Image (cartoon, grey):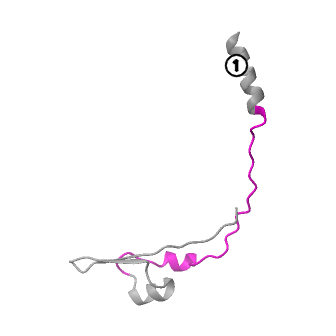
Amino acid sequence: MIRAITVFTLGLLLNGCLVTVESDSDSVQQVWSESDVSRLKLGLSDGDWVRSSFGDPVTKLNYADGTEIWKYRNISEKDT
C-alpha cells in the first residue's frame, strides 16, 4: 500500500516536469567542401595543395624520421 501511494505521489510530482527545448540547427557555414576532404590521401597529398585548400594547420608535429602530422579543426556554428 505504501509503495502504491509513493508511486502515485511521484507520478503527480513528475507530471509537470516535462522539459522541451526548441532548437534550430542550421549550419552557419561549411568551412571545407566534402570533395576536398575526400581527396585527402594519407602520406600522398601534396602539402601545398593541403595548405591552399584548408589553410595553415592548428598544430604541426614533426618527428625524427621526417614524418609530419598536420592537425586541423573544422568548426561550424549552430543556433540552439
Where is residue 60, by image quadrant? bottom left
Q: Residue at image x 52%, y 80%? A: 36
Q: Residue at image x 41%, y 90%? A: 48
- If the image is split into quadrants, where does the C terminus sit? bottom right
Q: Which residue is mark 1?
A: 6
- Above or below, 40 against 5 in this view is below
Identify the residue at the far top of this view: 1
Residue 33 at what x, y percent from top left? 58, 78
Residue 68 at what x, y percent from top left? 31, 78
Magenta range: 15-44
Kind of residue at disc 1: Thr
Q: Is most of the magenta stretch helix, strand or loop?
A: loop
Q: How many marks?
A: 1
Residue 67 at what x, y percent from top left? 28, 78
Q: Judge the density around disc 1: few (<14), some (14-19), many (≥20) Cα neighbours within 10 Å.
A: few
- Above or below, 41 against 7 in this view is below
Q: Quick check: 29 left or right of 12?
A: left
Viewer-closest of 8 and 40: 8
Q: Is residue 57 magenta?
A: no
Q: Quick check: 39 left or right of 22?
A: left
Where is residue 18, by image quadrant? top right
Q: Quick check: 46 left or right of 53?
A: left
- Above or below, 66 against 76 in this view is below
